[in-house]
Image (cartoon, rainbow, N blue to C red):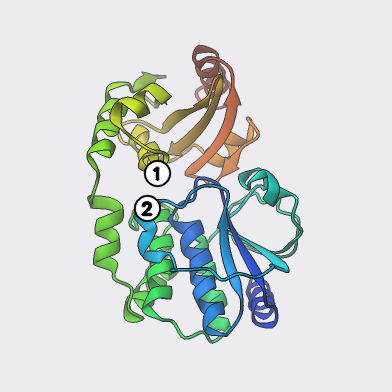
């Protein structure tokens, strides 16, 4: 892994005019990693930009620069992007020079890869890469990296947390990361729309297989009723796995007519990434997802049948 970190550091140090690509429905980790690199490269006098196929969520506003700069990118670097399908249609046609990721399965056809599935967040890897580059860690860079780590670990409570995760977070706080402000904004402060959406999700949870599985469908009507936006939905998938005794929590979000995205969260013996792989998706051991088509009842039946066949025999 050290060789991959060194190669990634060398690539970023040597090249200029870099476009940093985040995945669709961007979260704190993809944005935090990309913007940390952005500020580091800018401090070295390089031209770079961050691009995402979706609008940037307002709640991460404190990470965004006033302007990116106008230039023609020559190199493309993906950050926290496990699958080519997680990029916009136009981005999928690009040539990728470097891929930095921490998912178990990664199909980005990049010339260089820095992928470690043991890392709790891609921002752990970005931190190590920037350290190798002898970057001056400003409070802005520290805020970006801390955001990625705390959001991808559920404020350090997920099973992906390692000792090094806490060590890196502590160093970032020493560099000026405002941990209190970030944790409050990410995990405590909620809009009225978010609280209303959570209420609807809890009311519509369904339990199966002796209450070991909980499934909820989040329809567009529910989103409209709650006054919720796509960014409001971030983190809602964790609710389904919260009830005591539930091993698999599945949140199925309506995207379009007969088009859904399922987010799977697991507690102990079920590998979420492996299960989602049956539907062409993937992710992490405890958090993964996949896309699925059909009407609501058909989608529910497909998921329950696969759960029964592969997990709850």
Residue that lies at the very extreme toward the top in this rendered image? 297
Helix, strand or loop at label 2? It is: helix
Q: How many marks?
A: 2
Helix, strand or loop at label 1? It is: helix
Q: Residue at x 65, y 78 (%)?
A: 6
Q: Which residue is mark 1?
A: 231
Residue 222: x and y, percent?
A: 35, 24
Q: Residue at x 22, y 39 (%)?
A: 192
**The quarter of the displayed image where residue 141 is located:** bottom left
Residue 226: x and y, percent?
A: 29, 30
Q: Residue at x 56, y 63 (%)?
A: 50
Relative to 289, say whether 77 is above or below.
below
Which numbered marker is on residue 23? none
**The quarter of the displayed image where residue 198 is located:** top left
Which mark lies nearer to you, 1 or 2? 2
Depth order, front residue of 118/67: 67
Residue that lies at the very extreme toward the front in this rendered image? 70
Relative to 215, say whether 78 is above or below.
below
Depth order, front residue of 148/284: 148
Q: Is residue 292 visible?
A: yes
Query: Dot 1 surroundings within 10 Å: few (below 14), some, or many (20 or more)?
Result: some
Residue 301: x and y, percent?
A: 53, 15
Q: Which residue is mark 2?
A: 58
Query: Dot 2 surroundings within 10 Å: few (below 14), some, or many (20 or more)?
Result: few
Q: Are marks 1 and 2 in contact (CB under 8 Å)?
A: yes
Left or right of 120 in this view: 16: right
Q: Is residue 218 visible?
A: no
Residue 153: x and y, percent?
A: 40, 55
Q: Looking at the figure, which quarter contains the N terminus?
A: bottom right
Q: Which of pointers 1 and 2 lies earlier in the amino acid sequence?
A: 2
Alpha carbon of mark 1 to alpha carbon of mark 2: how far? 8 Å
């Amino acid at each position: 892994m050290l060789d991959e970190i060194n190669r990634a550091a060398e690539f970023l140090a040597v090249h200029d005019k870099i476009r940093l690509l985040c995945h669709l429905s961007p979260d704190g980790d993809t944005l935090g990693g990309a913007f940390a690199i952005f500020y580091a490269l800018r401090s070295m006098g390089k031209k770079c930009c961050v691009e995402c196929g979706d609008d940037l969520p307002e709640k991460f506003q404190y990470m965004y620069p006033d302007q990116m700069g106008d230039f023609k990118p020559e190199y493309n670097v993906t950050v926290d992007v496990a699958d080519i399908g997680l990029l916009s249609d136009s981005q999928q046609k690009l040539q990728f020079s470097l891929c930095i990721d921490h998912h178990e399965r990664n199909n980005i056809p990049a010339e260089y890869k820095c992928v470690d599935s043991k890392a709790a967040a891609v921002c752990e890897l970005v931190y190590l890469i920037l350290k190798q580059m002898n970057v001056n860690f400003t409070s802005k860079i520290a805020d970006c990296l801390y955001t990625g780590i705390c959001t991808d670990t559920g404020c350090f409570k997920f099973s992906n947390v390692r000792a090094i995760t806490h060590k890196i977070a502590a160093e970032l706080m020493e560099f000026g990361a405002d941990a209190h402000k970030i944790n409050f904004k990410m995990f405590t402060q909620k809009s009225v729309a978010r609280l209303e959406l959570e209420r609807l999700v809890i009311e519509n949870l369904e339990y199966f297989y002796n209450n070991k599985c909980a499934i909820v469908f989040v329809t567009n009507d529910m989103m409209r009723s709650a006054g919720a936006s796509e960014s409001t939905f971030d983190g809602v998938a964790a609710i389904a796995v919260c009830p005591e005794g539930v091993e698999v929590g599945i949140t199925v979000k309506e995207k379009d007519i007969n088009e859904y995205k399922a987010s799977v969260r697991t507690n102990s013996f079920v590998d979420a990434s492996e299960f989602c792989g049956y539907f062409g998706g993937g992710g992490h051991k405890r958090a993964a997802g996949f896309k699925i088509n059909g009407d609501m009842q058909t989608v529910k039946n497909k998921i329950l049948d696969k759960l029964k066949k592969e997990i709850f025999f």
